[in-house]
Image (cartoon, rainbow, N blue to C red):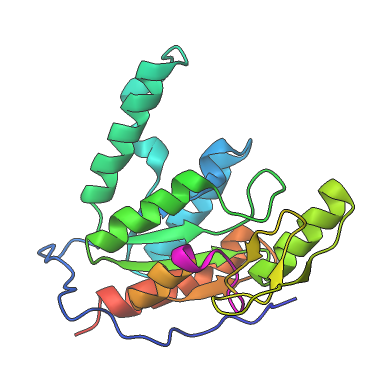
Amino acid sequence: MNDTPRSASHEPPEQYSPRSHQGQRPRIYLAGDLVFRPDADRLFMELKKICADAGLEGVAPLDGQIDLDGSTPGFETTLAIVSADRSLMDSCDAGLFCLDPFRRSADMDPGTAVEIGYMAAQNKLLCGYTVDGRFYPEKVRDYWRAAWGKELRPRMTTGGSGGLEDQDGIIVHSEGMIQNGMTEGFIRLSGGTISVGATLPEASVPAVKALAAGLLRA
């Protein structure tokens, strides 16, 4: 298990520049599958306190959905939530992303992956955290064992970012990374880090400190 936080190997893009808040704390978008968890309110409260202790303002997706409370589930409500989340991301200076596997699979929440790409395109600083420090190919291996009772196998061809494939012949990629290479890669290319801990709040602390160092630097 990879349980040691790793530092970023890339500097933030030259065009990245935190906006001036005229004395206000930089705003951090708290992204991840936390919104779907039964203890979402408690988790976001803890994350906001961790951000506040670091001189940042944590902003949860639920903060932008207050007007949608009580809405009937369906297409229009879902689209309204997406729009609210996008507006919230636009108002933030950086993103903090939970990279935990989603619904017992190897991959993270796909909606959070989209948000990583969206904020990366805005050249904002990103950091990630997780309680699952296994490398991505290990997650795929364990998923195939648990769900299908089958093992991965060596690839018959070479090249790419993985030396194994699953029983469908799909490459098991992103070796050396905790999550899909595009998601973790965008975080690291922004100048951010990935941290691992026993609980989500504990795991988030080094990532929040890294955000503060990047956003509050002189």
Measuring 77% from the left and 63% from the top, which residue is drawn there? 141
Depicted 4 relative to depicted 21: above or below:
below
Q: Is residue 176 magenta?
A: yes
| Quadrant containing the N terminus in the rendered view | bottom right
Left or right of 1, for residue 124: left
In the rendered image, residue 131, in percent from the top left (x then y), is placed at 66, 63
Depicted 10 relative to depicted 208: above or below:
below
Q: Is residue 153 magenta?
A: no
Q: Nearer the viewer, residue 95 or 177?
A: 177
Left or right of 43, for residue 112: left
Check the image and name the residue furthest to the top.
72
In the rendered image, residue 65, in percent from the top left (x then y), is placed at 35, 30
Measuring 16% from the left and 73% from the top, which residue is drawn there? 17
Res 57 visible: yes
Left or right of 171, for residue 116: left
Range covered by the magenta-colored residues: 175-183
| Quadrant containing the C terminus in the rendered view | bottom left
Measuring 69% from the left and 78% from the top, which residue is drawn there? 2
